[in-house]
Image (tube, coloured by chain):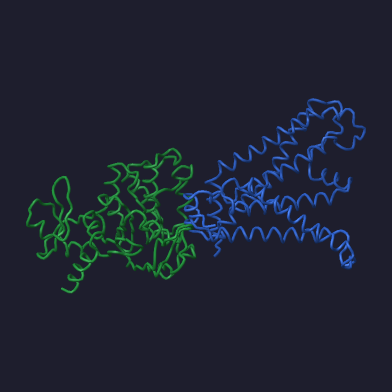
Chain colours: A green, B blue
């Protein structure tokens, strides 16, 4: 569904490319987490995917159409929730009436359902909302458009604590089988329970790209004080409560995916991590 | 590339999301013109008692001058707002991403900020003239014979009487061309487009003046057969040049808008 072929991109007046010969293919359906260090190119990649930026080389094909052309049919099937955005000073009902017609699959009922998840009344003026409230409204509208591709850049920034748990419920309950959501974030704890797939970027390229199912099949995550376990671990991380370990899952045990540990492991020892998955695929 | 239904939705979106700002601009323009009208009336209303030519309204010269300069200046300001939504990152993102073709988005904005503005400006001229008429009628009831509202038929007679058709043509050429220049400036200069476009136009005009003057001197000096060039260009030729220039300016601004990204690359 989404093909990213040999993308190279740099910003004006910067010597180094943000993305260098970057390629990625995403199948339809699923929630993808896009993780990476500051400056790794996560937001840039999202903007390139939806045609907000033009690459120096390479292309992005969404359902066969080059997103650089910004065809209305393509744009009506992609929605991006950026980190910062602007809403006009109109009532929410007017905003829905003005913008809903551009998205063929837009549903007013879905919109009201999402608003109630976030505890937002439908009869509000957008100009009078706080940043967090605007974000909730914008995300509600984004999901109500029912586009096949939804991109979210740091979606939980600015949300209060109830808002973050509402966001997780909201993403999972609104997901459709044919819909793909890509979430770029540093706040891994806000989304680790909803992801189907993890992509880690570093050094202008993809460092790690596997499904959450395969990750928990190949690896085991635990918090322990046991020295034997710590010694056997592929990766260890000191925490106030103990030591977080990442172990090979030789016994096929279930464990909760620890995205922070996985991310740090990927950055520290990408070769070791990817070898673990190669072994899994061979078996 | 172009769908009538989607274009209608785009036009409605641009109008409804910006209606407060647009209305405020029209009100400010009307208010300023009314203020200047009041100034003209209180400075010159005595002419109604002294002007021997009762056929002509003595304040028309000043009022028409006010209208001409208001339409040119406010037209330039309106055209400079054509690409206002491309001035910051968040607005650019929103403008680029909503599902309409770039041509539909551009055309919707063009209609609002160019011809619809002109209609609003003409309405503002009518209202300020109506204000003049009402005030003068109440202040100087005795010599109201010469007092006339500027209506299309009265204005046509006035232009015919004083043979001002070439001036009218030059005025409309100036309005159309300056709007196209400031529209082009709005896509290149995101911050302070009015001032920057004005400075750029003055610099370019100065350069062209010297090039044109130099060319004229070459032709005039006898090196070339000066009979190849007629003395005064025809109004038709000037209109062709102005329309061609406007098309070039709008085409360039559309092309630049179409190639816009959320960052300012150049």
Looking at the picture, how far across and down is residue B122, in whole percent?
A: 71, 44
Compared across the picture, whether A193 is left or right of A102 comes to left
Instruction: Locate residue A27: give its quadrant.
Output: bottom left
Compared across the picture, whether B60 is left or right of A222 comes to right
Instruction: For the C terminus of chain A, give its image quadrant.
Output: bottom left
Q: Residue at x 48, y 42 (%)?
A: A89
Looking at the picture, how far across and down is residue B119, in whole percent?
A: 68, 47
In this view, the residue farthest toward the bottom is A282
**Up-down relation of residue A135 to residue A104 (above or below):** above
Looking at the picture, how far across and down is residue A271, in whole percent?
A: 23, 66
Instruction: Locate residue A123: give its quadrant.
Output: top left
In this view, the residue farthest toward the right is B52
Q: Residue at x 42, y 71 (%)?
A: A64
Instruction: Locate residue A31: give its quadrant.
Output: bottom left
**Up-down relation of residue B118 to residue B36 (above or below):** below
Frontmost residue, B131 versus A87:
A87
Frontmost residue, A75 versus A10:
A10
């Amino acid at each position: 569904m989404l093909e990213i072929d040999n993308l190279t991109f740099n910003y004006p007046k910067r010597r180094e490319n943000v993305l260098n010969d970057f390629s990625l293919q995403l199948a339809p359906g699923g929630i993808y987490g896009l993780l990476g260090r500051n400056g790794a190119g996560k937001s840039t990649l999202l903007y390139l995917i939806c045609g907000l930026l033009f690459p120096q080389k390479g292309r992005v094909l969404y359902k066969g159409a080059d997103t650089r052309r910004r065809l209305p049919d393509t744009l009506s099937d992609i929605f991006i929730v950026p980190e910062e955005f602007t809403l006009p000073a109109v009532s929410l009902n007017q905003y829905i009436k003005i913008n809903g017609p551009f998205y063929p699959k837009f549903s007013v009922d879905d919109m009201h359902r999402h608003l109630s998840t976030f505890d937002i009344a439908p009869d509000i003026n957008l100009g009078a909302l706080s940043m967090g409230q605007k974000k909730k409204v914008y995300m509600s509208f984004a999901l109500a458009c029912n586009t096949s591709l939804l991109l979210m850049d740091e979606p939980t920034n600015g949300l209060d604590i109830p808002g973050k748990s509402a966001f997780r419920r909201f993403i999972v309950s609104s997901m459709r089988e044919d819909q793909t959501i890509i979430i770029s974030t540093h706040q891994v704890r806000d989304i680790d329970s909803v992801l189907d797939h993890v992509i880690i970027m570093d050094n202008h390229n993809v460092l790690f790209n596997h499904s959450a199912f395969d990750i928990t099949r190949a690896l085991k995550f635990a918090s322990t004080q046991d020295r034997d376990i710590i010694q056997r671990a592929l990766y260890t991380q000191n925490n106030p409560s103990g030591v977080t370990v990442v172990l090979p899952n030789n016994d096929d045990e279930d464990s909760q995916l620890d995205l922070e540990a996985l991310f740090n492991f990927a950055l520290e020892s990408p070769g070791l991590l990817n070898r673990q998955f190669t072994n899994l695929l061979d078996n | 590339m172009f769908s009538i239904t989607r274009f209608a939705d785009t036009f409605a979106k641009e109008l409804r999301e910006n209606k407060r700002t647009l209305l405020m601009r029209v009100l400010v323009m009307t208010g300023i013109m009314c203020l200047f009208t009041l100034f003209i009336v209180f400075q010159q209303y005595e002419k109604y008692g002294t002007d021997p030519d009762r056929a002509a309204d003595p304040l028309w010269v000043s009022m028409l001058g006010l209208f001409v300069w208001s339409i040119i200046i406010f037209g330039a300001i309106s055209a400079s707002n054509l690409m206002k939504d491309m001035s910051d990152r968040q607005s650019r993102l929103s403008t680029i991403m909503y599902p309409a073709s770039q041509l539909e988005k551009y055309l919707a904005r063009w209609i609002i900020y160019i011809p619809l503005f002109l209609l609003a400006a003409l309405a503002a001229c009518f209202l300020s003239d109506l204000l003049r008429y009402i005030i003068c009628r109440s202040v100087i009831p005795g010599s109201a014979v010469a007092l006339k509202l500027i209506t299309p038929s009265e204005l046509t007679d006035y232009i015919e009487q004083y043979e001002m058709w070439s001036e009218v043509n030059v005025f409309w050429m100036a309005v159309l061309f300056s709007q196209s220049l400031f529209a082009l400036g709005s896509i290149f200069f995101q911050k302070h487009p009015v001032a920057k476009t004005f400075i750029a136009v003055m610099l370019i005009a100065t350069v062209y003046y010297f090039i044109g003057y130099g060319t004229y001197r070459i032709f005039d000096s006898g090196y070339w057969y000066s009979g190849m060039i007629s003395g005064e260009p025809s109004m038709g030729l000037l209109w062709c040049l102005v329309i061609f220039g406007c098309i070039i300016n709008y085409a360039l601004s559309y092309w630049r808008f179409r190639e816009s990204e959320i960052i300012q690359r150049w």
